[in-house]
């Protein structure tokens, strides 16, 4: 006798530049639940991913379903997002490396472009060298910047002429982001329609106005490079899903994904609006060969070896992005690199207090321990105030974001607690005197006896166990000169903390974190923070570092 | 076996070859005239106009290439012409002068490869090369060519400065697992064309590049030099199979493109191919520490994810390394090295 079992499956797939992640969700007893998931290097192909999922499903489902599982999986509704097939390459030509060039470069990278070359008139090269360099490059677009608004800069015109000399007519589009006074003259150097003008990225010596150029370049990236259906691009889909989640939860959310090549950050407001950035060089590969990055990663990691060893690792992350750290030292360096890249994502704009920070992608959400993921988010982003931390372990946010708006909301609602893995809540303070009390935190847990306030000194990190599903009311008394971000009228701040795999993290290490200069002191301090986050304490006992 | 190589042509380059032409590595494929330092040419004064008004009299736009005698500006019968072939860069409305960069003498564009010209367009020349292409993971330097010479005895042996003698001049040396900045500096000083390595410490490579950049600034460096890494960064030996392939092709002509991390070996058999996702029985090479660069045989793929020492739990395989232990390695860190057909 055969038993007919009605079942429904859906496949959520996120194909990154290095790793592909897939989750199978199924209707279980009337509810949609995450059934299984798999991840593998993208180069292994779709067939291998299907086989992998099938193996895991066979172990997880009702044995009566096994014979038909292959067909069931093959016919499952596929919801897929992917990283752009190739990065968009752009050349920046500007008057000054520090001012117009730096500003244009940052805007281009924040829009997701890979800057193939930055040529400036003060870069020490001869005109012939600059021209030869520009002519040797294969590029999708050009950005020219220079001259302050209200002035007529012949040097800026010279930078534009350099591009006009190196670029073939009709090839990649040109964007003028310099002095408005000479916009017409610059446009006249190129064929009709070849050059478009945006607001000056450096209108005066003191201000950088990156947004207009960045937004223009984001649009251009989609039309020039990502000609495929843009709704399936992770850079579009992830922010959309985060926006929908913010609207559904009423929370202010920042999501970050540090990928192999690039990075995505999305800041969503409770009304569902969001601001997203794609950082072309913001992935783990972006640090290789960058002067000083190996030394910084080595200092941040503390236990990853010397600068030379870390430099080799950073090159390995660039040249073999799908490979994995096998040793604790390499993992530590990789996470330090991720923390460094996460910090650079928010350097441009202070994001203000957040309600929820989500870590996405293999580097953060795939960290072996939840504490390691929490540390990348905390140390990298330094979310001031009281913030929930979570990770997208199943990589479902990106695929969900490819759906129409109403279906994204429905998907978020259906997956409920399977959507994100909560890490806990962080309380991050800024300011205070080293060694003095930065904050006194009283944790009221329903059903627990009243506890004495926990004193957290400046420079300390403490973890209070608070399991997933638990809540606690916090009374926080910041010390002298210490702030939690928002202005306050009362000496006490009341807040609600939700639990997770790590717990309640009381972090008085300041913003930014300042490490001791002496190597031994630095290593000891970094190790104590790592241990405070990672230790498995007795229930109810806080971990202090 | 043949591969296609493309040489990009800058604007204004004049091709010297035709489709079907067979070229040698040192042969000039095209010429170009690069611009020299900028010079000012008075425009407003010669036209007897104010600097602002003279702007409207310009006959050219910035970025235009001009021949000698070609008109720069014209007004009421007066004209200003280019004194020599030049690139017009900008017009200064404050002093009424044009900034132009005179074009220097012809510069050759050399392909650095041996092959047959298969196509030519204004953007580049495509050449069909009879030989093998190896793509590495990194490198430095420009394009060079020379005869291959294997300088070490073992694929994991370090290339030392003492191994480079006058016999290496003009050749491409194949080293093993590493070369110090001192070795690279000596190689360049001895006139070695280029070096192929399994790995090198990134710091050593950066130190070498910095030394060369400083020497170039003071005019102490002549000739081209390139380094290509095939396996990884750090002390990483060449795959023994690939090393044997190099030994079998010692004496062949090769071209090295340092910045592109490419090696062409002419009239060569295909090198051992690489494949992601190895299977049991495959010969594999590991890419991450602590086994980076080691070759072995994949015994079996484990049935369940295995946690490495780092704590990352992934699909892993049991690998019996040559002259070493049998260990568990994440499958993502292994590549199958396929045998050379017919070997």
Image (tube, rainbow, N blue to C red):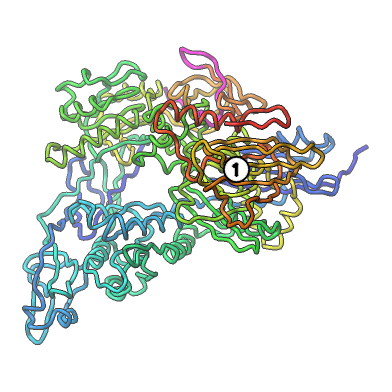
Say if B46 sits above or below B39 in the image.
Answer: below
Residue A504 relative to residue B167: left or right = right
Q: Is residue B335 magenta?
A: yes
Q: Does the magenta stretch include residue B276?
A: no
Q: In which quarter of the image is the N terminus of chain A?
A: top right
**Horizontal and vertical percent position of residue A65:** 82, 39
Q: Mark 1 points at which residue?
A: A439
Residue A382 relative to residue A2: left or right = left
Residue A105 relative to residue A461: left or right = left
Q: Which residue is drawn at 23% across and 59% down?
A: B11
Say if B246 sits above or below B46 in the image.
Answer: above
Is residue A365 or residue A10 the one in the foreground?
A365
Q: Which residue is drawn at 53% across and 16% down?
A: B320
- Chain containing the residue with disc 1: A
Say if A80 sits above or below B184 in the image.
Answer: below
Residue A400's image quarter?
A: bottom right
Q: Give the range drawn in magenta.
A: B321-343
Is residue A34 or residue B9 the one in the foreground?
A34
Residue at the extreme right of the image, as rendered: A1
Q: In which quarter of the image is the C terminus of chain A?
A: top right
Say if B315 sits above or below A401 in the image.
Answer: above
Is residue A126 or residue B231 the one in the foreground?
A126
Q: Can residue B6 be seen in this view?
A: yes
Residue A260 relative to residue B139: left or right = right
Q: Residues within 10 Å of mark 1 (few under 14, many from 20)?
A: many
Residue A531's image quarter?
A: top right
**Horizontal and vertical percent position of residue B95:** 13, 74
The total number of labels drawn is 1
**Horizontal and vertical percent position of residue A279:** 46, 52
**Horizontal and vertical percent position of residue A137:** 31, 53
Q: Can residue A188 be seen in this view?
A: no
């Amino acid at each position: 006798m055969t038993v007919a079992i009605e079942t429904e499956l859906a496949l959520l797939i996120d194909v990154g530049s290095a790793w592909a992640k897939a989750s199978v969700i199924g209707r279980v007893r009337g509810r949609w639940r995450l059934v299984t998931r798999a991840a593998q290097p993208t180069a292994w192909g779709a067939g291998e991913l299907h086989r992998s999922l099938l193996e895991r499903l066979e172990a997880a489902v009702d044995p009566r379903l096994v014979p038909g599982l292959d067909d069931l999986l093959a016919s499952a509704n596929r919801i897929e997002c992917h990283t752009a097939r190739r990065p968009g390459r752009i050349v920046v030509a500007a008057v000054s490396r520090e001012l117009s060039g730096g500003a244009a470069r940052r805007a281009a990278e924040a829009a997701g472009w890979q800057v193939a070359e930055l040529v400036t008139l003060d870069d020490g090269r001869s005109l012939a060298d600059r021209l030869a360099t520009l002519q040797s490059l294969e590029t999708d677009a050009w950005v020219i910047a220079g001259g302050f608004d209200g002035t007529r800069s012949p040097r800026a015109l010279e930078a534009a002429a350099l591009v006009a000399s190196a670029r073939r007519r009709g090839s990649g589009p040109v964007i003028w982001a310099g002095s408005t006074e000479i916009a017409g003259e610059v446009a006249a150097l190129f064929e009709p329609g070849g050059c478009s003008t945006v607001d000056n990225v450096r209108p005066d010596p003191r201000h950088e106005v990156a947004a207009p150029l960045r937004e223009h370049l984001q649009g251009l990236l989609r039309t020039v490079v990502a000609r495929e259906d843009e709704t399936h691009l992770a850079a579009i889909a992830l922010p959309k899903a985060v926006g929908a989640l913010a609207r559904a939860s009423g929370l202010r959310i920042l999501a970050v994904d540090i990928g192999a090549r690039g990075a995505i950050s999305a800041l969503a407001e409770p009304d569902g609006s969001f601001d997203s950035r794609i950082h072309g060089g913001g992935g783990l590969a972006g640090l290789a060969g960058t002067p000083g990055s190996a030394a910084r990663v080595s200092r941040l990691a503390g236990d990853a070896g010397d600068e030379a060893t870390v430099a080799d690792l950073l090159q390995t992350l660039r040249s073999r992005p799908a490979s994995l750290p096998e040793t604790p030292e390499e993992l530590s360096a990789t996470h330090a690199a991720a923390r460094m890249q996460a910090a650079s994502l928010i350097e441009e704009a202070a994001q203000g207090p957040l309600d929820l920070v989500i870590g996405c992608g293999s580097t953060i959400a795939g960290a072996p321990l939840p504490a390691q993921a929490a540390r990348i988010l905390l140390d990298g982003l330094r979310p001031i105030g009281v913030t929930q931390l979570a990770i997208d372990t199943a990589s479902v946010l990106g695929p969900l974001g490819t759906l129409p708006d109403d279906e994204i909301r429905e998907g978020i609602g259906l997956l409920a607690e399977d959507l994100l893995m909560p890490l806990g809540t962080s309380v991050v303070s800024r300011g205070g005197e080293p060694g003095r009390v930065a904050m006194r935190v009283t944790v009221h847990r329903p059903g627990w006896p009243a506890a004495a306030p926990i004193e957290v000194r400046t420079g300390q990190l403490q973890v209070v166990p608070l399991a997933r599903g638990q809540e606690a009311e916090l009374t926080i008394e910041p010390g002298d000169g210490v702030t939690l971000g928002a202005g306050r009228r009362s000496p006490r701040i009341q807040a609600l903390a939700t639990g997770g795999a790590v717990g309640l993290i009381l972090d008085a290490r300041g913003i930014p974190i300042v490490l001791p200069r002496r190597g031994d002191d630095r290593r000891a301090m970094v190790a104590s923070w790592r241990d405070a986050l990672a230790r498995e304490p007795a229930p109810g006992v806080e971990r202090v570092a | 076996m043949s591969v296609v190589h493309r040489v990009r042509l800058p604007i204004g380059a004049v091709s010297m070859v035709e489709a079907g032409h067979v070229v040698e590595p040192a042969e000039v494929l095209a010429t170009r005239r690069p611009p020299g330092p900028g010079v000012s040419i008075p425009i407003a004064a010669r036209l007897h106009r104010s600097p602002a008004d003279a702007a409207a009299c310009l006959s050219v736009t910035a970025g235009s290439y001009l021949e000698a005698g070609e008109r720069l500006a014209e007004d009421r019968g007066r004209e200003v012409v280019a004194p020599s072939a030049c690139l017009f860069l900008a017009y200064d409305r404050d002093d009424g002068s044009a900034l132009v960069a005179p074009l220097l003498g012809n510069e050759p564009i050399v392909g650095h490869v041996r092959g047959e010209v298969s196509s030519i367009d204004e953007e580049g020349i495509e050449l069909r090369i009879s030989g093998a292409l190896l793509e590495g993971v990194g490198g430095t330097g420009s394009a060079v060519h020379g005869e291959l010479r294997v300088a070490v005895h073992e694929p994991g042996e370090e290339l030392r400065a003492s191994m480079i003698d006058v016999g290496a001049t003009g050749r491409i040396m194949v080293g093993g697992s590493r070369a110090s900045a001192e070795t690279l500096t000596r190689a360049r000083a001895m006139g070695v064309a280029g070096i192929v390595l399994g790995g090198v410490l990134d710091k050593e490579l950066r130190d070498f590049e910095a030394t060369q950049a400083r020497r170039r600034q003071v005019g102490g460096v002549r000739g081209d030099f390139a380094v290509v890494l095939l396996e990884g960064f750090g002390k990483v030996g060449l795959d023994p199979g690939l090393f044997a392939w190099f030994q079998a092709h010692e004496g062949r002509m090769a071209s090295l493109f340092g910045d592109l991390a490419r090696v062409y070996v002419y009239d060569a058999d295909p090198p051992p191919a690489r494949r992601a996702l190895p299977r049991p029985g495959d010969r594999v090479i590991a890419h991450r520490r602590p086994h980076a660069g080691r070759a072995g045989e994949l015994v079996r793929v484990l049935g369940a994810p295995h946690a490495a020492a780092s704590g990352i739990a992934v699909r892993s395989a049991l690998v019996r390394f040559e002259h070493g232990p049998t260990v568990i390695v994440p499958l993502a860190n292994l590549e199958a090295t396929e045998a050379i057909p017919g070997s």
